[in-house]
Amino acid sequence: MEDSRIALPIGTALDRFIKNKQGEFQYATGELSQLLRDMALAGKVVNREINKAGLINIAGAIGTQNIQGEDQQKLDVLANIRFIRALTKGGEVCAIISEEDEEVIDLSNNKGKYVVAIDPLDGSSNIDVNVSIGTIFSVYRRVTPIGNPIQKEDILQKGDKQVAAGYLLYGSSTMLVYTTGHGVNGFTYEPSLGEYFLSHQDMCIPEEGNIFSINEGSFNSFSSGLKQYIEHCRASEYTARYIGSLVADFHRNLLKGGIYIYPATAKAEKGKLRLMYECNALAFIIEQAGGIASDGKKRILDIEPTEMHQRVPFFVGSKKMVEKAEATINAV
Ligand code: AMP
Ligand code: P6P
């Protein structure tokens, strides 16, 4: 009997995929490969802790707030520690921008070639209600000479300078999805083997879709143009899907087609999402998958950052849907 009928291939392991891709860059030293492995390892540890959240005392808030004034959940802080520790031990990173830390984290590793911007656990308020949550990260090459202390220009780089970007989705299964500028690939974690396996090769978002993801509870504070676009979605009988967890909404729309919008609202006059460690990474991924991402007017990856935690309005997803939203909003 043919082997594959009794033993289905399990797909390419992440480690082999990373190694194969490195081989396409003859001058590569292996530093980016190691950084990607460090992120994957931390993702396994965070995944384990999330899956225990209902059973041991690591769910819930810890009574402190982050720079954004948001209640920190225990797992927010745990995830932050895990990723910082993994990147510190990996030795490839000189600095980290984290949603959970007001100041840049200087790893005092001036030989490190890369800077990482990370939201260690996005959507963490959903942990207690068992809704999928995620980690979002961007990787930049430092611009000042290696061996010297990091400078501001190493930290505040435009999104189009990203070397890599990805997210981990802790959902019905845990996935790592990332790009290094040559397409988007998704890996599903197999806990029994402790390894991620290629499950979604060359991911592409449909150019058109019929899912719109926005918190319509803020409808009254939307601009008139945005109200018109939402009314267009309703009249077109699109499906409204918004689970309050950016990575989960983004991932579904990436697979099925759709648009995710977090606009300026009365409560968040520049929008809620952060440019450096949420929007830039997802914008890089969506462009690599054939979609687009803007602040309603300007390409996200072209926005010159002015501060680490700055917020921007975020429109991301299927090319034709985002274009239609931009045209509607900017017509009034
Ligand atoms: P490195 O010398 O390892 O820092 O790699 C130098 C450059 O080669 C990186 O910034 C990437 O553009 C590319 N590269 C190296 N390794 C990989 C990989 N595993 N996957 C994709 N691109 C890679
Ligand atoms: P709202 C979670 O806090 C988050 O950053 C995203 O994951 C999510 O899409 C959004 O905020 C939800 O915010 O204001 O609609 O509850």
Image (tube, rainbow, N blue to C red):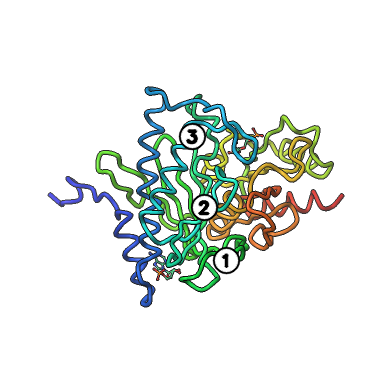
* Contact? badges 1 and 3 (CB < 8 Å): no
Vertical side of 235 occupied by 15: above or below: below
Disc 3 is placed on an element classified as loop
Circle number at residue 161: 1
Q: Regarding ligand 1, which quadrant of the image does it lie in?
A: bottom left
Label 2 or label 3, whichever lies nearer to me, is: 2
Vertical side of 302 occupied by 198: above or below: above
Who is closer to the viewer here, 2 or 103?
103
Residue 303 pos. (x, y %): 69, 60
Spatial CA distance of label 2 from label 3 is: 27 Å
- Label 1 vs 3, first from the N-terminus: 3
Q: Residue at x 29, y 47 (%)?
A: 195
Spatial CA distance of label 1 from label 3 is: 29 Å
Mark 3 Cα-neighbour bin, 10 Å: few <14, some 14–19, many ≥20? many
Type of amino acid at the residue the image marks with label 3: Ser
Q: In the displayed image of the protein, which residue is found farthest to the bottom?
A: 27
Vertical side of 305 occupied by 145: above or below: below
Q: Residue at x 68, y 51 (%)?
A: 322
Spatial CA distance of label 1 from label 2 is: 20 Å
The residue pinned by badge 2 equals: 105
The residue pinned by badge 3 equals: 132
